[in-house]
Image (cartoon, rainbow, N blue to C red):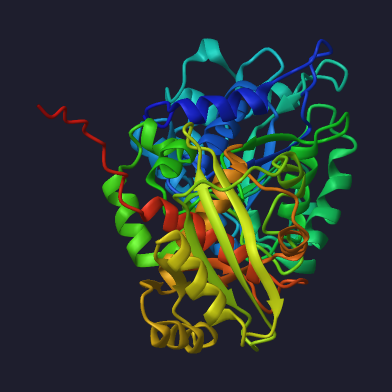
Amino acid sequence: MLGLDLKPQGETLARLLEARGRDGLYLYPETVVEMPRRSTKTTAILDTVLGRAQTRPGYRCVYTAQSGTIASRVLIEHAKLLINNGLAVESPAKRQHPDKIVFYANGGRERLEWPRLTGDGRIVVTAKQLEDGLVDPGRCVTVEDLDALEDDERPQVRQSAVWAVPPDAGAVRSQASDDIVIDEAGELEGQRGVDLLDGVLPLMDTRPLGQLVVAGTPGLVRAGMFWGLLEEGRAGGRHAPGILDYAARDSDDPTDRAVWRRVHPGLASGLTTMAVLERRYHRLGPVKFAREYLCQWPPSATDAAIDAAAWAEARVDVVPAPERVGVAYDVAVDDSSAAVALAWRDEAGVAYVAVEHYRPGVGWLPDAVHALARRRRVPVRYDRIGANLNAANEVERLRGVRLVSGGQQQTMAAEQLLVSALAEGRLRHFGEPPLDSAVEGAAWRLTQGGRMFGRRSSTSDVVPLVAAALALAQFDALPAPADLTVVRAG
């Protein structure tokens, strides 16, 4: 109908919406859809809606989005495609085209109306339209002929329609409909979205073949209508909504191009390209890009940065550290504590992290770092921020140790490296209380460039965890050990 190519993710979405049980009713009368920008989410939903209107006489659907203006714009775009393909006309031409879909542009109340049909599929026209030869006589019946019939002989006349309305419960309630589509639901935050959902759900009670479709990309906080429906869908259960969820995991690195390829369906289907996503990334920055193009919800202060179950699963018995390790230290922002950590990988690439020192204050740190680095003959990494700089100056004054400093970007990458290794089942630890406590209370902090373990937003001291992440990054940065060559003399 629209002249558009079918995309695999669009077909998947349509199959979810159209899935039916043995009773012929929808398996998912409530459906939640999370898909990134440029992945044909809105088009696939409206394709399905238009297909229902075309094939189910009397079908009616209300479409809304984050504003009435945007809902109207979306319906106008699809109406233009129908008009260009000869299936629809604008309302002034409706009398000359009784067999066409009619588009009404009403400034915020746009709608598409299908021809009026009788139960046996005949188009209802006026006698004048029939006389003018505007429709095949074998496909129609006149209004005058219907009016001449007795009430018990008159066939039921049904007309399909699709409306665009503002995201207001009153506006939606005023339109009797089979389906209700709430698009860009992530933008309907707080009580506004909750009120809209509470207002429209009762409308579905008397629609056996009705369906509520809530779709969007993540909002700014993990709360509200859209987040709640996603959580219900992800949890599953008998009464859970159907769900289609193209989303990055919390543990995923939003700067990793492999994550982009895995999450964004538009790349595999040719709907967009990596070059386009690269431009969007550099324009939006990692935080907003992750939200809109990877469907990765921003963390809140109450969300744990580390998966507790995965951390518990990663605990192993203590093994001695090898000679070749990564070493790093970190200091609390108020100098109340400091930690030194070690990290290494085994031959299979599995990472191990351990805390070498964790003590109150910071006066002890320079001597401890200096002694450890000299003994193991390795450089020591630290985050180049105020609390760590004084300790670095003291270590350098003692001489004989190379320090490796990094800024915010390097620290973010190191912390993501640790989280990703844990999520992939490639991280081990020894159940040390300082690390366990840090993990239990660690929360993400959003920055302009991404996210970090929050030093103030976390409910525990994350210093040991930061040191462990930096130590693992330092181990990975070490030069590969040189191969030994045996030379036989004589």
Q: Is residue 194 above or below residue 479?
A: below
Tell me where residue 456 sits by quadrant: bottom right
Q: Nearer the viewer, residue 438 or 429?
A: 429
Q: Nearer the viewer, residue 111 or 279?
A: 279
Image quadrant where one finds the N terminus: top left
Q: Nearer the viewer, residue 151 or 315?
A: 315
Q: Nearer the viewer, residue 331 or 183?
A: 331
Q: Is residue 436 above or below residue 405?
A: above
Q: Which residue is at a point 47% across and 53% down the rendered structure image?
A: 325
**Can you see residue 72?**
no
Q: Where is residue 371? Give x, y as percent.
A: 50, 72
Q: Which residue is at a point 50% across and 23% down the rendered structure image?
A: 130
Q: How many marks?
A: 0
Image quadrant where one finds the C terminus: top left
Q: Where is residue 480? Give x, y as percent.
A: 31, 45
Q: Where is residue 192? Give x, y as percent.
A: 76, 66
Q: Where is residue 216? Give x, y as percent.
A: 60, 50
Would residue 90 appear left or right of 251 to someone viewing this image? left
Q: Which residue is at a point 72% across and 73% down the rendered structure image?
A: 461
Tell me where residue 441 sits by quadrant: bottom right
Tell me where residue 145 sits by quadrant: top right
Residue positioned most to the left: 490
**Can you see residue 60?**
yes
Residue positioned most to the front: 490
Q: Is residue 309 above or below residue 222?
A: above
Would residue 34 appear left or right of 406 to someone viewing this image? right
